[in-house]
Amino acid sequence: MTFLTAFVTVFLAELGDKTQLATLALAAGGHARWLVFLGAALALVTSSALAVLLGSALGQVVPAIWLRRGAGALMIGLGALYVLQPG
């Protein structure tokens, strides 16, 4: 269940984000589509590995409920900044 939750969460979060659009542009502009795919996949795996390592280390020091609350507060704060910015 943890695997499925992680997969669905990351998959949905990545749909249509700027990284995916940049990967789309790279693939459209060149002939090395598989190299673009491999580079993008390796980048996502690497950033995910860093997040898992950091989350694991933080989980040893900070209770999980506070990590979830902090992440939620950060997302609300970033959303508010986005909504309130002029133009």
Image (tube, rainbow, N blue to C red):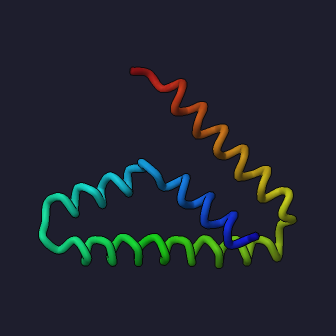
Q: Position of residue 84 (x, y in %)?
A: 54, 24
Of residues 75 and 44, the one nearer the viewer is 44
Residue at point 37%, 56% (across, down): 20
Q: Quadrant of residue 31?
A: bottom left
Image quadrant in which the C terminus is located: top left
Q: Position of residue 23 (x, y in %)?
A: 30, 60
Image quadrant in which the N terminus is located: bottom right
Of residues 13 and 8, the one nearer the viewer is 8
- Most distant residue in the top direction: 87
Tally of marks: 0
Residue at point 78%, 59% (across, down): 67
Residue 37 higher or lower than 23, as above or below: below
Residue at point 60%, 31% (across, down): 80
Q: In the picture provided, is 20 more to the left or to the right than 51?
A: left
Residue at point 82%, 76% (across, down): 60
Residue 47 higher or lower than 17, as above or below: below
Q: Position of residue 2 (x, y in %)?
A: 74, 71
Q: Position of residue 82 (x, y in %)?
A: 51, 32
Residue 3 higher or lower than 72, as above or below: below
Q: In the picture provided, is 50 more to the left or to the right than 4?
A: left
Of residues 23 and 54, the one nearer the viewer is 23
